[in-house]
Amino acid sequence: MPSFARTASAPPRAGERIDPAAANARATRMIDAVCGLLPPRAQPLLRDALVLVHADRPLATLLLLWPPLWALWFAANDFPPPLSLVAVTLGVWLAQGVAALGANLLQRRWPRLALAADTDVAVLGRFGPRRALALAGGLVLGLLVLAAAVQVLALAALAVPLAVTHLVARRSAILAPVTCAALRAWWVPLAFAAAGSALSPLCWLLYVGAIVFGVLQDSERALVTRAFDLHAGRRTLAGVFGDADRAIVAVLMAALLLALALAGTRAQLHWPWFVGVAVAGAELVRQWWQMRERAPLACLAALRGNNRVGLVLWFGLLFAVALR
C-alpha cells in the first residue's frame, strides 16, 4: 500500500506535534539507495541536498501535482503532448525543491520568518548556504529551460508576484493559505499553455478549483496540528475557524466538487469523469467523517487521502477523453 494511504500506528505523546511534512520512510530508503551508488565521501553531501529539496517528504509535491495533470488532459482533450507532460511533471518537483531551499535560506537570513523546519536548519548548517544557493540556482535554471521548451516563460514569470504576495501575507492565518493556494494553483494555466491550449474560461474554472483544493489541504493540515498550535498560541486556519472548522472544510469540499463538475460539463466530457467526481466526493465525505473527533492522526490520514481524490479524478478523466 502506498505510504500516503497508510495511517500511522503509534499514537502521539501528550504535547507532541505531529508534522504533516515529516520524512517518509519509503522515500528515505530510496534516498539511501541512490546515495549508496556514490563514493562514500560524496554520499553525505548528496543526502543533505536531497533532504533540503524535500525529496524525503513527497506528500506536498504529490498533492501539488494532481491539478496540473488534470489541466493537461482538459487542455489537450486527449493524451497531452509528451513534452508538456514531462515539463509540467518535472517542473512541479523542481519548483518544490526551489521553495524548500528558499525557505531555508530566507530563515537563515531572517530567523524571525520561521519558514523552515528545525531539521532543515541543521542540514543547511552542514551543507552550507553557498552550496544551497548554488543548488537553488541550478533548480531555477532547470525550470527556465523547461518553461522555454514549452514556451511558457512569460506566463511562468507571473508566478513571481504571486510568490511575493504570499510572503507578505504569510503571517495572516486566512490570507496565507489563500495566497499559497493561488501560487501553487498557477500550474493549471501553465499546464494549459504548455499543452498549446488557450487560457479559456475552462482553464480559470479549473484554476479556481485548484485554489479551493489547496485551501482544503491547508485546512486539514491545520487540523493535524490544531491542539499543539492553540497551546503554543500560533494562529492557524483551524484556530481562526474555531468550532466551525469542520463546517468550513465541508464547504470547501462541496465547492471543489462543484467546480470539477462544472468543468466537466463545460468540456463536454463523457460519464467516466462524473463517475470520478462522484467517487472523489465519497472519499471526501469519508475524510470529513474521519476528522469528526479532530484526532491528529485521523486528520493526517484524511490529508493524505487527497492523493486518492486526485488519482480517482485523473483516472476518470483518462477514460472520459478516451471515449471521444
Image (cartoon, grey):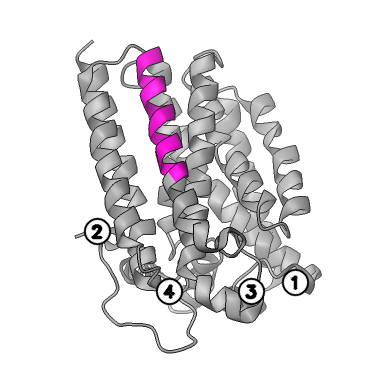
| Total numbered labels | 4
Q: Contact, CB < 8 Å: mark 2 with mark 4?
A: no
State the separation of the CA atoms marked 1 and 4: 30 Å
- Which residue is denoted by mark 3 in the rendering? 124
Q: Residue at x 54, y 39 (%)?
A: 211
- Which residue is denoted by mark 1 in the rendering? 108
Which segment is the magenta one? 251-266
* Above or below 150: residue 178: below
Nearest-to-viewer mark from 2 and 4: 2
Along the line of sight, the residue nearer the viewer: 61 or 245: 245
Nearest-to-viewer mark from 2 and 3: 2
- What mark, if any, has residue 39 been given in the picture? 4
Which quarter shows the N terminus?
A: bottom left
Which quarter shows the C terminus?
A: top left
Along the line of sight, the residue nearer the viewer: 103 or 180: 180
Q: Residues within 10 Å of mark 4 (few under 14, many from 20)?
A: few
- N-term-proximal mark, 1 vs 3: 1
